[in-house]
Amino acid sequence: MPYHEFDCSTCIPERKKHAVVKGPGETLADALPAGYLNTVPGSISERGCAYCGAKHVIGTPMKDVIHISHGPVGCTYDTWQTKRYISDNDNFQLKYTFATDMKEKHVIFGAEKLLKQNILEAFKAFPDIKRMSLYQTCASALIGDDINAIAQEVMDELPDVDIFVCNSPGFRGPSQSGGHHTICIAWFNDKVGTVEPEITSDYVINYVGEYNIQGDQEVMQDYFKRMGIQVLSTFTGNGSYDDLRAMHRAHLNVLECARSSEYLCNELRVKYGIPRLDIDGFGFEPLADSLRKVGLFFGIQDRAEEIIQAETARWKPELDWYKERLKGKKVCLWPGGSKLWHWARVIQDEMGVEVVSVYTKFGHQGDMEKGISRAGEGALAIDDPNELESLEAMYKLKPDCIFTGKRPGEFAKKIRVPYLNAHAYHNGPWKGFEGWVRFARDIYNAIYSPIHQLAMLDISNDEIPTDKGFVTRRILSDANLSDEIRNADNLRQYTGKFDIIPDLRNKTAEDFPYLRQDKLEKAI
Amino acid sequence: MACNVTERQRAGVINPIFTCQPAGAQFASIGIKDCIGIVHGGQGCVMFVRLIFSQHFKESFELASSSVHEEGAVFGALKRVEEAVDVLLMRYPHVKVIPIITTCSTEIIGDDIDGLINKLNDELLQEKYPDREIHLVPIHSPSFVGSMISGYDSAVKDIVKYFATKSEPNGKLNVFTGWVNPGDVTALKHILKEMDIDATVLFEIEEFDSPLMPSGQHVSHGTTTIDDLKSTANASASIALNRYEGGKAAQFLESKYGIPVTIGPTPIGIRNTDNFLQNLKQITGKPIPRSLVKERGIAIDTLTDLTHMFLAEKKVAIYGNPDLVIGLAQFCIDLEMKPSLLLLGDDNPNYGEDPRIKELKEKVDWEMDIITNADLFELEDRIKNKGLELDLILGHSKGRFTAIDNKIPMVRVGFPTYDRAGMFRHPVVGYAGAIWLAEQMANALFTDMEYKGEREWSLNVW
Amino acid sequence: MEDLMKERIEQLIDYIMKHCLWQFHSRTWDRERQNREILTKTKQILCQESVEPADRLDRCHWVDAVVLAEAYRKNYPWINKLDTSEIAVLMKGVHERLDYLTITGSLNLELTDQHY
């Protein structure tokens, strides 16, 4: 029976259908964890709320927009700077956040006037910004403020501004995922098709479900530009509001995080006939296949091959250096929604680690289908995990490293399991060829940390090895390697820079020979 | 040249200084031993607060959610609390205290948690957990009132009110520390020990800085016990160091149990620490020992090396918790600095009556603005658009971009200070705090001098 | 023969499950279309028939099929030795198996939700 019952959860038997161990010869038809159900109250779940899914995950990465939350300050404060979605607009979206500061009197008498005042004040404070997103919170939803009406009033008064309204209060749905859905459908219904873009290429895509964490989007956009493709819009990392209003003009939707935005791609397919191509930007082989597919779609696959060859030649020797030293290390792949399936197989194939568990905080059954398919036999798959279950799993599985959020990483640390931040990364970006090597390097540094070694010593009980001196990471990692591999001169450690984004941002026309020369100003 | 107190003119907040009340209630609850709070509202209300705590302390804290979903928001969600209490008690056998913390959503829909707690005490706890000591403490903390500061203040009072039980006098002093760091608690306990004062420190949060041990699991918890809380009713006196954080609880003990209360001062800087010691002496009759004279002397010595050479005339902006801001302003003045802008981040109507603010208005002879109900845009706007010149910023990490973009050195103080390592481990109170603060400020200014090439050679011979 | 066919189908299914995402759209009707279009085209490519995508949407199916066919040829050399009728039978088996695993036998309760 592949359903897994946690000792700490036998008293809440409804949890049993949320965890599955992938057994030998078993298929998805045999067992699949339940997904996207109501959270068990008091379980100390990892989940957040629908406001977060809408405003923080998808809304705020838009870089040229004033993002105002209609409610008391807490929601706004909490989602300000707490995710690493950067932009090339001087990080305006990280630096500034806006709340209408609802107070008790507004709860009683309504806050629509307050909202309107806020909107006008915000535009006045930032006169160069003409775009705004308004987010409902639990408070403003419950008092029934008509945010859409107020937004329309302002747009009528100020014809050069455009305002997007997202009605996704925290309680809408069991987790963040409800918010993703709300904002995708709202953007599709209200904003797509309201701007006609300038087309600068014969090959036009929307890049969907990518939030530019630590520069991921900029890495991928660079590949597309090198192929001569116009990335009409990115939903929403490093993305621009008006570009996203023009999504209907793309030839292809390239989709990464299906969990957060497949809704939008599906609607775009039905209404505008734009196909949906699901890709993986993580890992050499999946990324190569992804670039090939995009290339094939436009008949420019030779350009994809150029990039794949050049990047692979440059970075594979470094990836393989880490792979040799990470082989057999056990990891728990514990992210929010999509990374469990983006990473489950390829991290094993290309970095040699063994994924002993996957989980999803707010994913649906579809994410589990993908994740379990790609994970190896014996992997423990958990839906909507809570703290005690996570601890029990770690004690049982004894992973060498865990990829999860910042806070759960802190209690993993306490039981001597080093963690890497699966949501916001350690030293990313982790997408792309170079990015994947950076990820491998982070894993290597986490596992072979001499401090981590020292953490295992109990100075009151164990013998202290005073005669040994220090160890380097290499001494630790190379201990069981053959001489041949240890000294292989075709492999080397990471040789990239501390910050790889500025070089991408400083590229010029010469770097993109396939972009149309007559459209360069817009295209760069 | 004068000190003006004005209120933020804009209706809305751009870059908030504080988060909302439930965060304060949650901060109070993690200071108690065997306590896991249930935040009654959307999951974000607890998930994000746990995140900011983990950013500040680099630790994870246990807090639960009642996970209100759409149905609960429409039809009422008390059943979710009932289930949350049951689930928590089943799975965490050591838990004795469960604060039930409300949020804006559950206050708006009118969930009666007090009524529910009575019901649970009579039914669930009797039937299913008859042999366990369990305390369900109602804490009302809607986000549309006050801020995390008032949330903390109310929660401390609600907790003390729930537990305080009159019995034999214990001869102790209740010390309500306010929203401080573990480093502050260490410094305060040191002073109390030097003065041979037996105190109940609320809350005991030194253990927040918890170790990574070679075996087992050592998660961060506070260590204030139920007995500590009960015995607050039997103290000989209370002192609340921060008027706005803990004052309510101290005043409650006075009105209900006649325990004399002293409010303040926030012991930041030499003068305020002197006053604190004087208060302690007056309240307890214990003398101020030579050891503290020596510690004070080391602090004065340290400061003397810094003040007229480097710190004099430096214009500083300060934002964060109100008692912290005022205390820091007073200290900066002692150090010959010129606090030019103070930002008090919520709409507490009592700031105008605060005698410390009145004192600033009376005595300051340079241009100083105190903004109430402020946000961080008030700081940035003045720098970018209104010609405010600053040499230093004292505040928490959420304001970091203002400092970075305008190239103004900033010393992280208050909550949260996640973009610098280990700030929570150091005090800002007491003589030790005076030394730490002054040296942090000086070193920040020195680094800035070096990066800007302004008199950096002067440090060759300091 | 039966067992060999079954084993080969499993290998090809395993490749799809480990490397592809196109079979996991969120609704039954989408999965039916994806499986049908992409596997039909894969079979056509493996049989060296010419494939004319009808429109943009169809071209996207074709793209996934091209990459899949290449992967099959590279990773399962036995496929290169099959004649077209054997490939047809094989791919029909793959299609049926995939439909079972992703649609008719799937435990994903969201597949039948009427809205996106």
Image: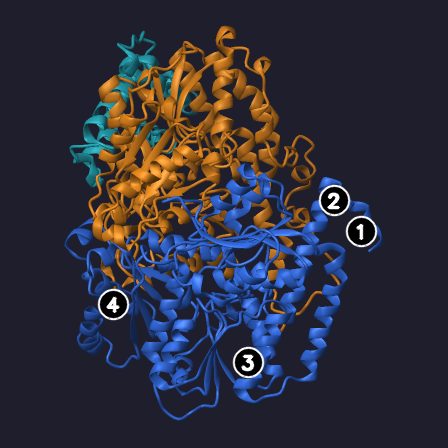
Chain colours: A orange, B blue, C cyan
Q: Is residue A364 above or below residue A292?
A: below
Q: Is residue A352 above or below residue C70?
A: below
Please give the name of the residue rendered at 48% of the width and 34% of the height, measured from the top-left corner. A92
Asked whether the viewer can see residue A376, the reply is no
> For residue B365, which quarter of the picture?
bottom right
Lower position in the chain sequence, tag 2 or tag 1? 2
3D distance between C-alphas at marks 2 and 4 = 59 Å
Tell me the chain of label 1. B
x, y percent for residue A378: 38, 48
Lower position in the chain sequence, tag 2 or tag 3? 3
Tell me the chain of label 3. B
Nearer the observer: mark 1 or 3; the answer is 3
Q: Amino acid at mark 3?
A: Asn
Residue B279 tag number = 3
Nearer the observer: mark 4 or 1; the answer is 1
Q: Amino acid at mark 2?
A: Glu
> Do the residues marked 1 and 3 share a common chain?
yes
